[in-house]
Amino acid sequence: MGFAESRADYHYRDAFGQEHGFVLEKQLEDMARLQTASADRFTTQTDYFSAWAHQIKTPIAAMGLKLQNEDSPLARGLRGDLNRIAQYVEMAMTYLRLDAETGDYVLKTQDLDPIIRGAVRRFAGEFIDRKLRLRLQETGQMVLTDEKWLSFVLEQLLSNALKYT
């Protein structure tokens, strides 16, 4: 079996002199078409989930405002559940941003302490409900980071710590 000198390197003749390059060429074209269709499907799904994640934030915020002035065991439980839902939405949005070509990451030098305090504040209700005490010490550190990304990571750490406490 030798390669033919025609159109492309993938044309070849078998032991009977039959040329098979057209089969390979067709398979390559089919594969390219499938890859394009898959990429288009992925983009459509990503756009849909991104729009959904942004839209679901409105009813979450509205429910949070309605529960804000309520102080009962039921209201505290609902606020905790609502915070977890908001975290899951934020997790989905962060995942979608990971593959985004534009990427809305803003790296700059940040004071670490306000970022930590903000993440802890989001879980204050759960700490109180579980009668847990957190000793938070100032770090005095400046870090080069994207504030949203670091907040997300810290919130995931706190969420997992509370989940398994």
Image (cartoon, helix red, strand yellow):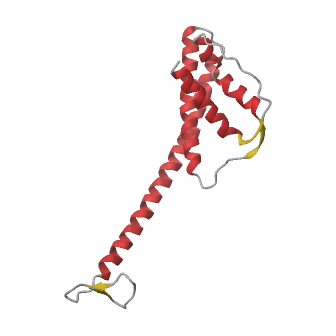
Q: Quadrant of residue 13?
A: bottom left
Q: Depth check: give the residue in front, 102 or 111.
A: 111
Q: Depth check: give the residue in front, 122 or 144.
A: 144
Q: Quadrant of residue 17?
A: bottom left
Q: Depth check: give the residue in front, 138 or 81.
A: 138
Q: Is residue 105 left or right of residue 100?
A: right
Q: Position of residue 124 (x, y in %)?
A: 65, 18
- Taking 128 as reference, is 40 above or below it? below
Residue found 55% across the figure and 35% down from its top: 89
Q: Quadrant of residue 54?
A: top right
Residue found 55% across the figure and 46% down from its top: 96
- Taking 13 as reference, is 95 above or below it? above
Q: Residue furthest top?
A: 72
Q: Position of residue 52 (x, y in %)?
A: 53, 40
Quarter containing the N terminus: bottom left
Q: Is residue 13 left or right of residue 97?
A: left
Residue found 37% across the figure and 91% down from its top: 5
Q: Position of residue 92 (x, y in %)?
A: 54, 39
- Taking 112 as reference, is 1 above or below it? below
Q: Residue furthest bottom?
A: 5
- Taking 89 as reference, is 35 above or below it? below
Q: Position of residue 79 (x, y in %)?
A: 58, 19
